[in-house]
Image (cartoon, rainbow, N blue to C red):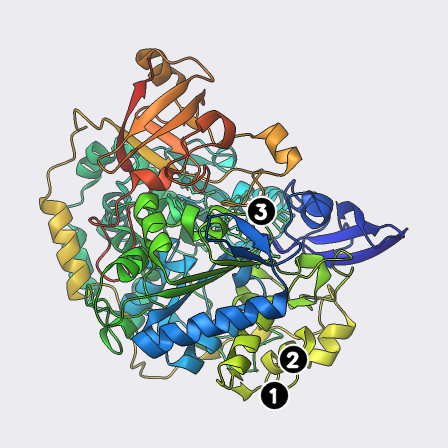
Amino acid sequence: MREAKSYCRICSGWCGVVLTIDENERIVGVRGDKDHPLTRGYACIKGLQAPEAHHGKDRLLRPLRRTAAGGFEEIGLEQALDEIAERLGAVLERHGPEALAAFRGTINVYSAAASQMLPDWLASFGSHGFYTTMTIDQSAKWVTVGRLGMWDAGKQSLDEADVWMLVGSNPLVSLAGPGMMSNPSLTLREAKARGVKLIVVDPRRTETARHADLFLQPKPGEDAALAAGLVHIVLAEGLEDAAFCARHVKDLAGLRAAVAPFTPERVAARAGISADDLRAAARLFAGPGKRGIVHGGTGITMSPRSNLTDHLLECLNVVCGRFRRAGETIPNPGAFAPARPRRAEVIAPLRPWERGPKSRLSGRGMLFGEKMTGELADEILTPGPGQVRALFVDGGNPASAIPDQAKVAKAFADLDLLVTIDPYMTTTARLSHYVLPPKVFFEHADLAPPAYESSFFKLPIAAYAPAVIPPPSGSEVVDDWYVFWALGKRLGRPLSFFGVALDMETPPSWDSLHEILLRHARVRFETIRERPGELLDLPPAVVEPGADDPKARFDVAPADVVSELAQLAAEPAPAAAADFGFRLTSRRLRDVSNTMYHALPEMRRRLPYNPAYLNPDDLAELGLADGETARIVSDRGRILAVVRPDAGVRRGVVSMAHGWGGLPDEPDAGRIGACTGLLISTDTGLEAINAMPRQSAVPVRVEKVS
Ligand SMILES: Nc1nc2c(c(=O)[nH]1)N[C@H]1C(S)=C(S)[C@@H](COP(=O)(O)OP(=O)(O)OC[C@H]3O[C@@H](n4cnc5c(=O)[nH]c(N)nc54)[C@H](O)[C@@H]3O)O[C@H]1N2
Ligand SMILES: Nc1nc2c(c(=O)[nH]1)N[C@H]1C(S)=C(S)[C@@H](COP(=O)(O)OP(=O)(O)OC[C@H]3O[C@@H](n4cnc5c(=O)[nH]c(N)nc54)[C@H](O)[C@@H]3O)O[C@H]1N2
Ligand code: SF4
Ligand SMILES: [Mo]
C-alpha cells in the first residue's frame, strides 16, 4: 500500500485528494487532502468515487465499433483510428472542412492539454465547427463582456467583501461562482464570520440560501425585470459610485432611462416578491464604501432573456464600482499566464460576434472561437453546403446534455461519422460509430487550464498532477489528445498545438504538451512539475493606474440592450398559462455531475433517478404522493418523473436536474431518471446572439399518471 497526492478533476473545486493505492496499482481509498492549501480537506461524494470510477465494472477498457446489427464489438485502437481516418477523409473530400465538428464536454474543459488539442485539430482542417458546453451554460457572460466591456484588474473578491449577492447560483453544491470554488462550506462560514452579508435570489431555498442574510424567492424567469429593478433603485436612491461612473461609464443616463419603467412595485408584482424586499436587497448591496459583487449563475443564464439579465447584474457591479482600483493587490496574478501589468481601466466591449464567420442557418456569429451548441442539431440535419457530417465528442455527453433531446438524438443518428471519447457507454456513445475509452484522471498527468487559473484559485498554485497509476492491465485506453494527433498524422494534416508545430512522427506526451502550454508562463513548467499542489511564491500583482483620459468605457446601455429592456417593459406581466401553470427550473444535485456517474453503484444506492422536486402544497393539490410518478408536459415534449416534496421550492415550480434518463425512446423515470432536455425546444426561444435555449423557467404542467 502507498499513498499519493493528486487533485480531483470532476468540477471546478479542484479538491486536493490523497489516494491509497494497493500493490496491484489500484486505487482503494480517497480522502480530501487536509494539507492542501486551498481546498483544506474538502472532497465530495463524487470525488470519493475514484476507486469505482477507475476500476468499476462499467468502465470501457477497449475501443468499440458499431456493428451493422446495431451492437458494438471490440476493435484494436490503431485499427479503429485507421478506419476513422478513412471515413473522415471521405467526409472531408465530399463535403469540405465545415462538415467536420467537435463537441467539448465538461471533462475536456478541465484538462489543459486535451482541451487545447481539440480546437487546434479542427483548425488544422480549416473547420470552424467548434461546439462546447459553454453555449448551453453561461455564454451570457461572454455576451456581457462583448456588449458591456470588462475591467482589466478584475472584480472585487470575497476575501475583501462586505456584501455578496448570488442570483441563480448555489455554490455550496455546485462549487461554481467566484470566490467559492475551493471548499465552499468553510469559505462561506469564514466569510460570514468576517461579517459578509449574503443575499441570495432563487426560486428554491437552496443549501446556500440557508446562510443568506436576505433571501428573495422570485418566480423563475423574471430575473431580467428583477435586475432592472435593482439597478433602478440604486440609481433612483443615489446609491451608485458617482465618481467611478463619471470616469468609466458611457451613457449612464441611457441606462437610467431604460430601467425607469422597472419600479419596485412593478417588478415585485411580476416576480412575485415584495417591493420592500427588493428595496432591501438594493440597499444592502449598494452604498458608499461597500465592497463585494453580484454574481448570476446558471439559474439566470438558462432562463429567458439570459443575456439581458446577466448584462444588468453586471451593470449593478459597474455602477457600484466593484472593481479592483489602482494600488490594490491581485492575490493570484497567475502562474501559468505570462506576466503583464493589470490596469485600473475598462477593456472595451468588442462584440466579436459581429465580425467573422456567420452561421449558414441563422446568421449568428461566433463567440470566442465557438459556434452555438443550441444550433448544432440543426447544422447536422439541414442539408446544404456546410452541413455537419462528422462529429467528435471528447469528455461530454451531448445526447443527454444538449436541450431538445429528441432532435439531438435524431441528428446524431443521421451523422456519417460520430466518434466519442468517453470511459462509459453513455447515450452519446450508444449513438456513435466508434467509442474510444480514454485514460481517466489519475492515470495521466494533467494541468489546470491556464485560462481559468486566476478565477479557480485565489492564490497562485502549481495546479499540476503527475500520473499516479497505470491504466488497468490488459486495457487499451487512449490519451484524449492522441486521437487527434493520430488522425492528423494519418490524414497528412500537421498539427500546430498552441502555436507550436508538433512532430507528426513521434507522438507528444502529456508533459511535452504542458511544456508548450506554459512556454510563456510566469513560472516555468519544470518548477510547477516539481511542486504539484503547492502554493507558488509569487508576489501579488499591484493594480496600476489606468490612462489619465480613459478611451474605453463600460457600455451600460447599448442599443440592443435598451431595445430588449423596452420590449420587456412593454410586455404585460405573465399570467400563469392555463395549460402550462408550472415552471420547470434547472438545478444541480450533490451526488452527480451533469450526466456523469449515474450508474456507479454508490450513486444508484443514493440517487437512482432525478426527482422532480415540488412544494408539498402543490403535490397535495395535484393529488401526488411522495415517490409517485407524474407526467411533466411542455409544448415540446413529455417525460415521466418521480416527484419528491421540498418545502424550500416556491409554489408553481418544478425543480429538476438535467442530463438523466436514456435516449428519447426509453422513458423510465424510476429506474434511470428522466431527461428534461425532452421538454426544451431549440426551434424557438433561442437567445439572439448565442442561441442559448430556454433551459430553466420552462412552462410545464404536471399530471398525475392514472
Ligand atoms: N436542461 C438543461 N440542460 C443542460 C443544463 C441544465 O442545467 N439544464 N446544464 C448544461 C451545462 S451547464 C452543461 S456544462 C452541460 C454538460 O454537458 P456535458 O459536458 O456534455 O455533460 P457531462 O455529463 O459533464 O459530460 C462529461 C462526460 O465525460 C465523461 N468522462 C468521465 N471521465 C472522463 C475522462 O477521464 N476522460 C474523458 N474523455 N471523459 C470522461 C463522462 O462519462 C461524461 O460522459 O449540460 C448542459 N445542459
Ligand atoms: N454537484 C454538482 N456540482 C456541479 C454540477 C453538477 O451537476 N453537480 N455541474 C457543474 C456545472 S457544469 C455547472 S455549469 C455549475 C453550475 O453551478 P450553479 O450555477 O451554481 O448551478 P446550480 O447549483 O444549479 O444553481 C442554480 C440555481 O439557480 C436556480 N434557478 C433556476 N431557475 C432560476 C431562475 O429563473 N431564476 C433564479 N434567480 N434562479 C433560478 C436554481 O434553483 C438553482 O439553485 O455547477 C457545476 N458543479
Ligand atoms: S467538489 Fe467533488 S467533484 Fe468537485 S473537485 Fe471536489 S471532490 Fe471533485
Ligand atoms: Mo456547466
Q: Earlier in the sequence, mark 2 or mark 3?
A: 3
What's the CA distance linking mark 3 and mark 1?
Answer: 50 Å
Residue shown at the point (24%, 78%) measured from the top left? 355
| Residue 95 position within the rendered picture, expressed as x and y whole percent measured from the top left | 30, 74
Check whether the beta carbons of the residues at disc 2 and disc 3 lie within 8 A of each other. Answer: no
Callout 2: SS: loop
Callout 3: SS: helix
Q: Nearer the viewer, residue 393 or 1?
A: 393
Left or right, 27 with reference to 362: right
Q: Nearer the viewer, mark 3 or mark 1?
A: 1
Residue shown at the point (76%, 46%) measured from the top left? 30
Q: Which residue is under mark 3? A: 191
Q: Amino acid at mark 1?
A: Asp
Q: Earlier in the sequence, mark 3 or mark 1?
A: 3
| Residue 151 position within the rendered picture, expressed as x and y whole percent measured from the top left | 40, 70
Q: Which residue is under mark 1? A: 503
What's the CA distance linking mark 2 and mark 1?
Answer: 7 Å
Q: Quadrant of residue 615?
A: top left
What's the CA distance linking mark 2 and mark 3?
Answer: 44 Å
Check whether the beta carbons of the residues at disc 2 and disc 1 lie within 8 A of each other. Answer: yes
Q: Quadrant of residue 36?
A: bottom right
Q: Amino acid at mark 3?
A: Ala
Q: Earlier in the sequence, mark 2 or mark 1?
A: 1
Residue lying furthest front in this view? Answer: 68
Crowding near pointer 3: few (<14 within 10 Å), some, many (20+)? many
Q: Which residue is under mark 2? A: 508
Quadrant where the C terminus sits is top left
Callout 1: SS: loop
